[in-house]
Amino acid sequence: MIIFPFLIDTYVINIYHFIIRLILFPYILKYGIILKKAERKQIKKDIINCPDILIMWLYRERLNYFEKLRRSLYEIARDALEIQLMKVSLLDSFNNYNKNDVEYVFLDKSELRPKSKKMEKESELFNTFIVIFCEGAINPLLKNYIRFFPENKAIKKNLEYLANFNMFKKYHSNLKYFDQPLFLDFVKELLNVDYALLIQQDPTIKNKNRYALTHFHVKIDWPIADAAEDLGKYLRYIQNNLYENGDEHARLLQNKLFEYYGCHYSVGGRRTAALIAAQLLKKLDMISTVFISSSESRSMIKYSERGVSKFFLIKLNNNEISALAARERITPDELKSSYLYPAKNYHVGISEAVYDYTQYSKPPENGKLRRLRPAYNWLTLVDEFLHPKPDLLTLRPINYNWVYSTE
């Protein structure tokens, strides 16, 4: 039985906290971004009266100076969160299998190709979660769909009812804020709570911008048909409603919704909830990220403004390590120490597959209605790379094209 000796060093996370607290936060706290009252009313009016319109987030070039600072803060915080979630989802899960003498089933190449149907059975040994991280605060008008209420707010009164919350005695009101040193430990403690965690700009602080884990046990309650209709209008496959071209067309469009988010339409409830949340959050004029760890897929999926990414463990033997090291012009030992983790007679690494949308899953340039062609792929694999160990901050990911390789 082999157990990873690797744990993310706390000083790595502290570096992110140092940047957040000492470099960016003073500016954000001093120059809080406040929408004018008329602008806030207009946004609410748009969401109420036009719930089917997909509001696009603004590119960095369209932001004012202080909004750019907020986005920089968000991206740094997201990087820190991503590192922690990769470890929990992949490395910790692998350790769970080894501790229990259960064979870990690595992904097959076909599972990472668009339209893949293959899934593994659920296992309690794989750490599962949904984490929603928003650049701003979610509009309260969406509470009926992303259900965050006083009853599931991250406060001590609500947390005391959790059975396995080991940090309860250490909990204080500031622990929920991203700039606190124990914040990522706090997130990790709550990951095993069912449904989703919500991290967003603290809506209770008016003239400042500060990220906090505001709610846990967040349910996603937006019908799949509504999400497919929303996406279909955006891509110009329908004009008014999902069923305007018949039931069969509506069924196909709902199936394509899942493909748009890198899943087969038969996936389980957790991945379904995550992709529905990602589609719903596109109604807001801010960027957001949904992290989903799935036992069925043995992977962590990220939905963001960049599209779809899948993180997974990859198994390498000595011959594969030597070939990759030679290509990168480093020694096999250097590759092992920088990118790989030892296991029994082999090594594993954290790989990421990045997907992009095809012409059939992008709005047409002429804006005209078009015919749905279900046989054509909506996603294409555009990049693959191997992540370095998180404590090696000067190393970049290296290219490792594996999904379509013939070896």
Image (cartoon, grey):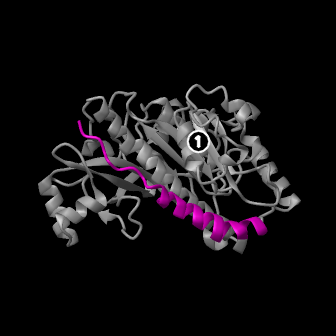
| Magenta span contains residue 92 | no
Task: Give the dominant element type of the magenta stretch: helix, strand or loop.
Answer: helix
Up/down of 294 relative to 341, above or below: above
Q: Which residue is mark 1?
A: 277
Up/down of 100 relative to 51, above or below: above
Q: Nearer the viewer, residue 394 or 255?
A: 394
Residue at far left of view: 319
Position in image of residue 111 (x %, y %): 30, 42
Amino acid type of the residue tagged 1 in the rendering = Ala
Q: Is residue 331 left or right of residue 102?
A: left
Q: Residue at image x 38%, y 41%?
A: 92
| Magenta span contains residue 12 | yes
Q: Secondary structure at mark 1?
A: helix
Position in image of residue 188 (x %, y %): 52, 42
Q: Nearer the viewer, residue 48 or 40?
A: 40
Q: Mark 1: give few (<14), some (14-19) or many (20+) Cα within 10 Å.
A: many
Position in image of residue 186 (x %, y %): 58, 43
The N terminus is located in which quarter? top left
Q: Residue 354, located in which quarter of the rendered image?
A: bottom left
Position in image of residue 366 (x %, y %): 55, 63
Q: Is residue 243 in view from this perspective?
A: no
Q: Which residues are magenta?
A: 1-30
